[in-house]
Each structure stands twice: as structure tokens, then as C-alpha cells.
Amino acid sequence: MTEISGITNKTTSFQAMIFAAGLGTRLKPLTDSMPKALVKIGGIPMLERTILNLKAAGCKRIVVNVHHFASLITDFLSDNGNFGMDILVSNESDCLLDTGGGLKKAAPLFLPFSPILIHNVDILSNINLKSFYINNVDSNATLLVSNRKTKRYLLFSDDMQLVGWTNIETGEVKSPYDNIRVSDCRCLAFSGIHTFSPRLFPLMNDFPNKFGIIDFYLKVCDKVVIRGVEKNNLKILDIGKLDSLSKAEIFINQIQ
């Protein structure tokens, strides 16, 4: 396994992608009339919160992918003057491409030599996005993880290299390594926040139009180094269900 060489360095321009194309089925009936990205938390749409957090961290360019009620998102960005940022839209109206496919489609919109900070629109956390980005500009990909209870875990070696994935409820394991033993790995939960180097885009050439980004990482982690970074005091909330909306307002007050 190797780190793919390139000219990325700590002076490159901070760019990001917000995954905002999801159907938001778990937030119905709210998402029957609007995209999940525009559901408000404390009076502010999730997309706006994510954009402003990235802007405060020093991000210069953001790519937002859209599908469900795509025009409402593009109109929202336009009505707010793109929040004074360089914001580009990757339109998936014809077909929802999942996270990996969405990133692959958006590839031409990114600066070629700067890492990309990827952030799910429905994630709230206390992570310092600026530090996370700067500390990982030279890596192929770095996944923010934590030791918290879930059904699905990423598997890491002792030196925090990604080696697999497991669902502890079903016993399913995915890994490019034969005879991997979950008991020998560090099992950590993914946050939905990660950095991705454009150097990895060529490895997506043989992937279909639609695929998950974690599936991509699991396919290539035996060829290139995909790292995990554990934040022990990470506070994170996935706004996936209706009952999480009220929790989100409390959560925001706790992390401010």
C-alpha cells in the first residue's frame, strides 16, 4: 500500500463537497415538499449551517450535489448570493448516484491539486474542520471516526489504516483481505466527514456511475493508504429521523 504522490501541500486552496442529494425518506413528511438539505434546525437550514461552518474554517470552494427538489436548493443558493463563496452545483436530477458516484460526477468541478473535505449535509459535530483539513492535506483519504455504539463499523489496523467493514448485527464483513478477523481490528464508527485527494479519481474509472464512497474505499484500501483519525471527544449527531430534529437544537447549544 502506498500514499499516491502528488503536489498537494498545505498552501493549496481549501475546497469541499457537501452531499445534499439524498431523498431524506426518514424525515418524511417534511421531505415530501422540500429537500432534506433545507430542513431547518434552530431556524437555519442544514445546508446553510454546513456552508457557514466550512466558510468559517477557511473553505474557498464548495461543490453541492443535488437531486431531490434540486431547483429548491439551487434557488436557495442563488437567493443567498452563494453566501459570498464560490459554490458550484453538481446536478444529479436524472439519477441519484450515491456518495461515490456523486463525487465521481463532480470531479471536473474541483481544483485538481487540492484535497477535498467531504461533509454530509445532515451531520452536526464539534470537529474543528480547519484543523482536520490542514492536518490531512497530504493523505489519500482520511476518515473521521470515533468509538461509539452503532451496528456498522469500519475496521482499522493498529496503525489506523482502513482494512474493512462489518455489520455486527448480521455478521457481514467486507474487506479486500482474505481471512480478516474482526477481533484483530479496531472497530470505529464513521462520522460522514472525510478528506479525499483528487489523486484518487483515476481509481474510480472502473467503477459504475452509482456507488457508495465507503465501497470505493474498501475496494482500494489494499492498494493505497486510507487512514482513519479517531477523535475521542467527538460529539456528533446524524439528523436522520424526525425525532432527531428536537435533539439537534439541544445539540447545537452544547457544541457552541
Image: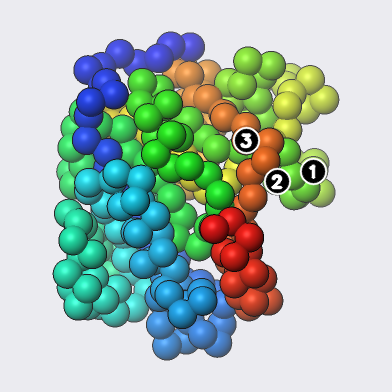
Residue 162 rendering spot, x and y as whole percentages: 58, 25
User: Which residue corresponds to mark 2?
Assistant: 152
> Where on the picture, by quarter, is residue 146?
top right
Mark drawn on residue 231? 3
Residue 203 rendering spot, x and y as whole percentages: 34, 28
**Quarter placement of the C terminus:** bottom right
Q: Is residue 74 above or below residue 106?
A: below
Whether residue 133 is visible here, answered yes or no, is yes
Residue 3 rendering spot, x and y as whole percentages: 40, 14
Residue 67 rendering spot, x and y as whole percentages: 34, 69
> Where on the picture, by quarter, is residue 164?
top right
User: Which residue corresponds to mark 1?
Assistant: 168
Instruction: In this rendered view, identify the residue nearer to me: 55 or 114.
Output: 55
Identity, as a three-letter code, of the amino acid under mark 1: Ile
In the displayed structure image, the side of residue 42 where residue 106 appears, left or right: left
Marks 2 and 3, how far apart at CA: 18 Å
The structure residue drawn at horizontal position 62% and vertical position 35%, both measured from the top left corner, is: 231
Crowd tier of the residue under label 1, counting other residues whose Cα lies within 10 Å: few below 14, some 14–19, many 20 or above: few
